Image: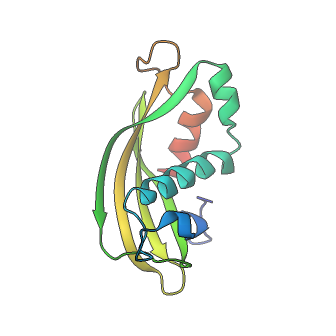
Amino acid sequence: MTSLTENGTKERFELPIRVYIEDTDAGGIVFHAKYLHYMERARTEWVRSHGVGLRAGLEDNISYVVQRMNLHYKVSAKLDDQLLVTAEPTASSRVWMNFRQQVLRAADRQLLCEADVRVACIALDTGKPKRLPENMQKILKKSI
């Protein structure tokens, strides 16, 4: 969970994930699109770790969509690897939030993939931009 350490520095949220056969190609290497799934899960769990329920947002006509993503693959993850997927908010506006995300191999913390992701808040019924809920704005202020 993102929080302040004793010396005042922020910790990154990390989600442990194991690579299953369904995540890999015939050679046992993680298919490139699976990294997007891992990052989506980490951002979702980051939100949950701050007490924000996604169902409540849906009931309030709110959804979050990836607007932009810049991804760099460095080293392949493989079948049975244990990974750590991070989610760290880096900036926000009234309608979007940016995250820096990494996929690390847990055993040696080697960086496998990294991304900068912009997530926009939209109205479910129209698909148009919508102001981030106040509780999310407060969480982001504390985390950035």
Q: Residue at x 46, y 74 (%)?
A: 104
Q: Is residue 130 left or right of residue 4?
A: left
Splitting the image into 4 quarters, where does residue 4 fall? bottom right
- Whether residue 8 is visible here, answered yes or no, is no
Hey, which residue is sitting farthest top in the picture?
A: 126
Give the percent coordinates (x, y) of residue 74.
Answer: 30, 73
Q: Residue at x 54, y 86 (%)?
A: 107
Splitting the image into 4 quarters, where does residue 75 fall? bottom left
Q: Residue at x 57, y 69 (%)?
A: 20
Image vertical order of residue 113 relative to residue 137, above or below: below
- Whether residue 52 is visible here, answered yes or no, is yes
Q: Residue at x 59, y 18 (%)?
A: 61
Give the percent coordinates (x, y) of residue 86.
Answer: 50, 62
Splitting the image into 4 quarters, where does residue 103 fall? bottom left
Q: Nearer the viewer, residue 139 or 66?
A: 66
Q: Nearer the viewer, residue 2 or 121?
A: 121
Quadrant assignment for the N terminus: bottom right
Q: Nearer the viewer, residue 10 or 109?
A: 109
Image vertical order of residue 93 relative to residue 49, above or below: above
Q: Is residue 9 left or right of residue 100?
A: right
Image vertical order of residue 95 relative to residue 26, above or below: above
Q: Nearer the viewer, residue 5 or 11?
A: 11
